[in-house]
Amino acid sequence: MPRIASVGELELLRVGLRSRRDANRSREAWIAICAGTGCLALGAKKVIDAFRAELSRRDLETEIVLKETGCPGFCEKGPIVVVYPEGVHYLKVDPKDVSEIVEETVRNGRLVDRLLYVDPVTGEKDVHEEEIPFYKHQTRILINNNIKIDPKNIDDYIAEGGYSALARALSSMTPREVIDEVKLSGLRGRGGGGFPTGLKWEAAREAEGSPKYVIVNCDEGDPGAFMDRALMEGNPHSVLEGLMIGGYAIGSEEGFIYVRAEYPLAVENARTAIAQARERGLLGEDILGSGFNFEVRLHRGAGAFVSGESTALMNALEGKVGEPKPKYVHTSERGLWNRPSLLNNVETWANIPVIINRGALWFSSIGTEGSKGTKIFSLVGKVNNTGLVEVPMGMTLREIIFDIGGGIPGGKRVKGVQTGGPSGGIIPEGHLDTPVDFDELTRLGSMMGSGSIIVLDEDTCAVDLARYFVDFLCDESCGKCVPCREGLRQMRNILGEIVAGRGKGEDLDALVDIASLMKSASLCALGRTAANPALSTIRHFRDEYLAHIEDQRCPALVCEGLISYFIRPDLCIACGLCEKNCPAGAISEGEGDEDTFMVIDQSRCSRCGICFHVCPSKVMAVARTSGRSASQQVP
Amino acid sequence: MDAVDLVKVDEIIERYRGQEGFLIQLLLDLQGELNWMPRDLMEHLSERLDVPKSQIYRIASFYKAINLSPVGRHMIHVCMGTACQVRGAQKVLDYTASKLSIKPEETTPDLAFTLRKVNCLGCCSMGPVMTVDGEYHGGVTLEAAEKALKGLR
């Protein structure tokens, strides 16, 4: 891979790559297969292998390009295969479909009907990305290239316009102008805080001291969020390019990419991207002949949620325990090794090349008054089309869940959505018409966080979910400050009592008290926001708390301590599956007159619910009930 | 530890010569080789790097990716992220634990399996998710969980 020594050489390379690519594409098909972690989990590797074998069998390996790409977001329907130049979108592809795709679509330009997207309402089939409702309602700026680029090949990124923003910044903008552009764009940090990115950059530029550092935070710890993984895996150069522009703007020559341990593919692709950028001369000395020097190091996390907090992450980069520090002085002034440090989240960095290329005015024309641009959300939980969706700030939750997400499976009622991860809150169904941006979500007692939207249906218990988050944070609190460590432990105790049916009338007030103390006295954002799940559920789902406390009833039939299982003799076919799987040995054959059926011994039942889940779906003889009168209902 | 181990260990230490703040990366590399962090290895590192034992132990015990006791030949992670949680991850975890007759975070006595909870694997679209020896399984039912374990012991 020859070094690119100037802006002119970069453009020349790009023209060459494009003409070669386009010549290829007009003559023959090329095939893109999502090789993100999601599709791989659904068997994409076998599909890729099958394509390789099929192309080699037909002697087409050189003619037809097979690309293992990043994640386009429609994970629900993976493995995803797109056949270009036509852009035919095949979903849920199995290795045994491969030969037919090659014969019909690649060779003869015909469609394989059964692999197309079927609209669940109209029954119509959609061929291209732009027709499929999941994609149609999105504004895909950051995630758009994922399915077109092989993340392990820098030339793919360059062909799609990659590093042109860096070239522009280095050749025709002063660092001051870059910062002004970012400020003018109105971009706010995508990691959760929503702090204006340009102001952060300005502070780091003006801070005294050298060297300065720029840092990518890819410690995406919020359970339910995976847009940073998709960008880091699928388009690592876009993040790297943003980081380099940031380095140039604040006067830093050294960058770090911090990736969490649970994302092995993101680590691998980031490492490859750094190595290839170095080979191409885009990292190192005198980049593109501008005199700007820049190097990047990759740092793997080792599995600690709190390490995603900026000061904790800097501690980890120094090789220390990843615990937060008090922020008396901003990290932009004294961060990593006490030197000025600029840390942004993956998605924030990926926005930078877009802003430089298309201009701050264009960028700020998208979104709402206070939140500009697009945001990638992970739409997950009880929703039909799960995956990553990129929409303009200000789209309503209802549009996201119903127009893009296709509604709730099984015709169930949406109960609410959980946003913002463990530090966020739960927004009830009545507020679904809220436009989603930083300020609106905060107003509802939740927050944007890194952008997870977890859809809850009537089978989710609000109290149990609050307990789950408090449990999670209790395990992840580093224990350094008392309000967070002890506050969470007390909240865990109280919520544990409530879900077990031992709640007391004063518990809700106690929870609110602890929460307000933690909010004002905790050291870092983990503790300050840790009470949000409990507070927002008490605010929006007080009835459910009262049902647990006063009636010992879990309306969603989730809390183990409050439900009883029984087997309906009229439905039971005595197949014995429940008996075989019951860990408590509580199930045996009942004594009936004619038909045999199974019976649960309530005194031995541990209420694990395994019988409920293993009972064949055609039979569904295991039933649940909850409340004070439950024991009377149980036969 | 035998001599072969130490040669390998020193080789790994060499990778980081001249860098600052590499201790966590070094422990991750060693963990990748050995699957766990024996006490005498930490002692050796302390001498070799001139870093207090307490500091090495503090890091090794703080981070989940570093194992302080031997793990099973097969590593099972059940994702307990929110998206998996609302789709029944707890049942998958309970069921897997009951099939292996251990609790989460434990290893079977024959050192065949270690069962771990993990906060989020980032495959939230296809929850519940579990990984068996690094291989991802999505949309896991109790049946699928049992099938994934079969034939491994």
Image (cartoon, coloured by chain):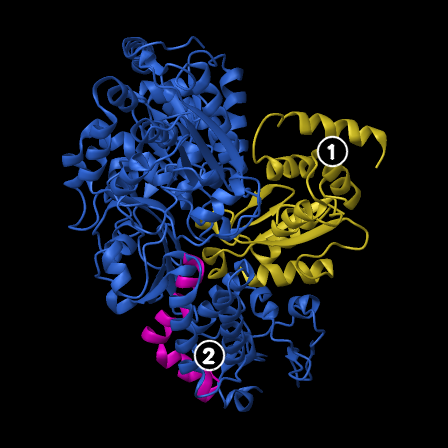
Q: Colour of chain B?
A: yellow
Badge 1 sits on which subunit? B
Left or right, residue A262 beside residue A93: right
Magenta-span inclusion, residue A544? yes
> Which residue is rendered at x = 47% and y = 50% of the image?
A221
- Amino acid type of the residue tagged 1 in the rendering: Arg
Residue designated by label 1: B48
> Which residue is rendered at x = 61% and y = 51% of the image?
B62
Q: Camera-side residue: A167 or B145?
A: A167
The secondary structure making up most of the magenta span is helix
Left or right, residue A150 beside residue A158: right
How far apart are the alpha carbons under marks 1 and 2?
Answer: 58 Å
Residue designated by label 2: A554
Q: Which lettered chain is shown in blue? A: A
As drawn, the residue found furthest toward the front would be A208
- Amino acid type of the residue tagged 2 in the rendering: Cys
Label 1 Cα neighbours within 10 Å, binned few <14 / some 14-19 / many ≥20: few
Q: Quadrant of the C terminus of chain A?
A: bottom right
Whether A83 is drawn above or below A9: the answer is below
Q: Is residue A128 visible?
A: no
Quarter location, residue A518: bottom left
